Amino acid sequence: MIHLTWKNRETIKKVKCVHTDAKKYLVHNALTTGKVYDVKNETEEFYYIIDNTGKVGGFYKEYFQDA
């Protein structure tokens, strides 16, 4: 149940959102192009960040670049 403590965990790295052009999902409500986000966890496909809603969300890595 590691996901319950992600918000309070140490930041792994910072990433910058480069676009919010999603094919299937609405990400423009939770991400802002050009904003830098703290990565709390990372998998092969996803970054888990604290998004604009203030909660931890998982997003495809294609929306980000290293800051």
Image (cartoon, rainbow, N blue to C red):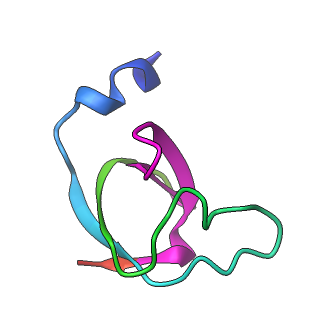
Q: Nearer the viewer, residue 5 or 34?
A: 34
Q: Position of residue 31 (x, y in %)?
A: 50, 64
Quadrant, the C terminus? bottom left
Residue extending furthest toward the right: 24
Q: Residue at x 51, y 44 (%)?
A: 57
- Residue at (21%, 51%) from the top-left corner? 12
In the visual, does 10 lie left or right of 51? left
Q: Which residue is found at the position 23% from the left and 64% from the top? A: 14
Magenta span contains residue 47: yes
Q: Is 45 left or right of 14, judged from the image as shown?
A: right
Between 39 and 44, the one nearer to me in the picture: 39
Snapshot quadrant of residue 29: bottom right
Magenta segment: does it hold 59?
yes
* Above/below status of 4 relative to 20: above
Q: Position of residue 61 (x, y in %)?
A: 51, 69
User: What span is in magenta?
Assistant: 44-64
33 vs 15, left or right, is right
Q: Quadrant of residue 20?
A: bottom right
> Looking at the image, is 27 positioned above or below residue 66?
above
Quarter of the image for residue 40 reads top left
